[in-house]
Image: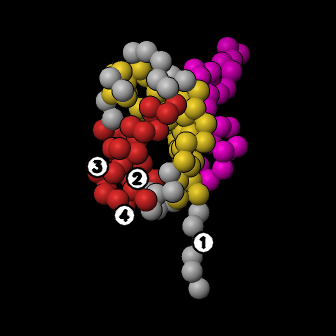
Amino acid sequence: MEDKEHQRYILFELIADSMIDEKDLIRTIWRNLFQLYGDVGASNTGLWLVEYEKNKYGIIRTNDHAVTMIKATLAIIRQVNGIKCIFSVKGVSGTIKSLKEKHLSKVMGVDEEPISDSQ
C-alpha cells in the first residue's frame, strides 16, 4: 500500500527594495530549486505558489517531504530580477486556514493577543 502524499503550506514574508512581480518571483524560486536539488529533486517537490501579496507575504504549497528543501531554497535567494530581497519563513501548516490563523498576524504586524493593563 502506497503512502498518500500530504500537502504542506509555507507562509513566507518577503522584504524587498521595490515591487516584485509574481512571475519573476516563482521563476527565481524554481531556478534556485533546480540549482540546489537538480531536475529530479525539484520536480518531486510539488511546488506551487498559492497566494502572493506583492512585497508582503506569500503561501507556497509543497509535499511534506519537501518542506526543508523549499525553506533552504528561499533562504539562499537574495535578489529577484535584479531587485534585492530577503525571504523569512513564518510558518508551516497542513491547511491554508490554520496557517493564516496561526501565522499571518506575524507578517501583517498585528498582535495576536490584545495587551491588557489590568492587574
Question: Which callout, 4 or 3, points at the residue further toward the start of the chain?
Answer: 3
Of the residues shown, which amino acid type is indicated by label 1? Answer: Lys
Q: Which of 82 and 91 lies nearest the eye of the viewer?
A: 82
* Nearest-to-viewer mark from 4 and 2: 4
Boundaries of the magenta span? 93-119
In the image, which disc is placed on residue 32? none
Residue 15: percent from left, percent from top: 43, 22
* Label disc, if present, on residue 68 of the rendered structure: 2
Disc with the residue nearer the chain's start (4 vs 1): 1
Q: Looking at the image, is 104 positioned above or below residue 45?
A: above
Say what secondary structure mark 2 lies in.
Answer: helix
State the residue in front, 110 or 36: 36
Task: Report the amino acid beneath label 3.
Answer: Gln
3D distance between C-alphas at marks 2 and 3: 15 Å
Residue found at x 39% / y 37%: 28
The residue located at (43%, 59%) in the rendering is: 43
Residue 103 appears in view: no
Splitting the image into 4 quarters, where does residue 110 fall? top right
Q: Which of the two marks, 1 or 3, is nearer to us in this view?
A: 3
Which residue does the numbered mark 3 point to in the structure image?
35
Q: Give the spatial CA distance, label 4 vs label 2.
A: 16 Å
**Residue type, numbered disc 4:** Val
Amino acid under label 2?
Thr
Alpha-carbon span between mark 4 and mark 1? 19 Å
Residue at which label 1 appears: 4
The residues tagged by marks 1 and 3 sit, at their Cα atoms, a distance apart of 28 Å
Dot 2 alpha-carbon crowd within 10 angstroms: few under 14, some 14 to 19, many 20 or more: few
Crowding near pointer 3: few (<14 within 10 Å), some, many (20+)?
Answer: few
| 40 sits to left or right of 5 | left
In terms of sequence position, does the residue under pointer 2 or pointer 3 come before the other?
A: 3
